[in-house]
Amino acid sequence: MNEKTMTQLQERARAKFAKSGSTYFAIMLAVLAVVVILSNIGASKGVLFGPIITDGGFFLFPLAYILGDVISEVYGFKAARLAIIVTFALSAFASLCYVIIIALPGFDDDFGASKQAALEGALGPVPLIVLASLLAFLVGQTLNSWVLVRMKARFGERRLWARLIGSTGVGEFADTLIFCAIAASVIGITSFGGFLNYLVFGFLYKTLVEVLLLPATSLVIRWVKKREPSYAA
C-alpha cells in the first residue's frame, strides 16, 4: 500500500462534523427542548404497570437521548453542548412560568378553586421534577455526547453502532441515577425497594428503547449527513 493510498484511507476515517448553523440543527434543537419540557410534566405523575414503577414521562425521554446522539454524531461536542444549554435554559424558564401561573390570583368561585387545585396538583411538583431533570440531563447528555465524540475521534466514521450503544449506556445510567435520586420522593416513592425498582426499570427501559431504535437512529444520522452541505463525508 503506497503513501497516497494510506493518506486517502486516513482521511476517509477521520472524524468529521457539520456546522451547526443549519435548518436541520435548529429543528432538532426545537424538538429536543419540547420533548424534555413535556417529559418533565409527565414525570410528575407516578405510573404503575403491575410490579413496575415508572413515571408519566417514560415514553418521551428516550427520544431526547436519540436526538442528542444525532446532534453529537453529526455536529460534534460543541453543538451538542449548545443544545444541552439551550434546552436546560428553556426547561428552567418553563418551570418559572408554572410557578407564576399557579401564584396568579384566580376566580374565587367553586370552578376557579377546582381549577387552581388541579393546576397545583399537576404543575406544583414540576419545578422539583425540573430540578431533578436539569441536573440529570446536564450530566447525562454531556457524558453521552462526550463519549460518542471521543469514540468517533478514535474510529472516524466506522462503528457507528458502537458509538451509539456505548454513549447511551454511560449517559443513561448517570441521568437515571441522578433523576431518580431527586424525583422519587416527589412522585410518591418512599421505600428503598420502590426506588430501586424505579431506577433499574428506568435505566433498562431507556437503554433498551435506544438499542431497539438503533437502526432508525442510524438511518436518520446518515440522512442528515447526506443533506448537510458542510458535512464532508
Image: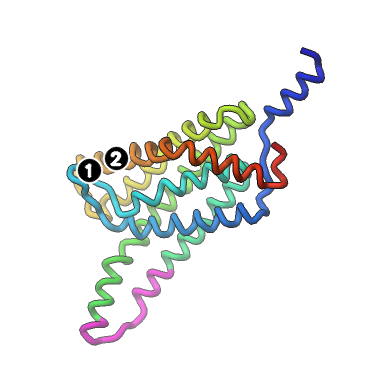
Query: In the rendered image, which quarter contains the C terminus?
Result: top right
Q: Earlier in the sequence, mark 2 or mark 1?
A: 1
Few, some or many C-alpha atoms within 10 Å of disc 1 (few <14, some 14-19, many ≥20)? few
- Is 60 on the left or on the right of 110, as rendered? right
Name the amino acid, label 2.
Answer: Phe
Name the amino acid, label 1.
Answer: Ile
Residue 121 picture quarter = bottom left
Q: Which residue is mark 2?
A: 201
Q: Residue at x 27, y 43 (%)?
A: 198
Magenta stretch: give its range: 97-112
Quick check: can you spot residue 177? no
Quick check: can you spot residue 206? yes
Q: Which residue is mark 1?
A: 52
Q: Residue at x 26, y 52 (%)?
A: 185
Is 227 one of the magenta-colored residues? no
Query: In the rendered image, which quarter contains the N terminus?
Result: top right
In this rendering, the count of numbered labels is 2
Determine contact: label 2, label 1, CB under 8 Å: yes
Tell me which colouring the rendered structure shows: rainbow
Q: Nearer the viewer, residue 145 or 130?
A: 145
Which mark identifies residue 23? none
Is 99 one of the magenta-colored residues? yes
- Magenta region, mostly helix, strand or loop? helix
- Is 175 on the left or on the right of 167, as rendered? left
- Is 128 on the left or on the right of 113, as rendered? right
- Is 159 on the left or on the right of 115, as rendered? right
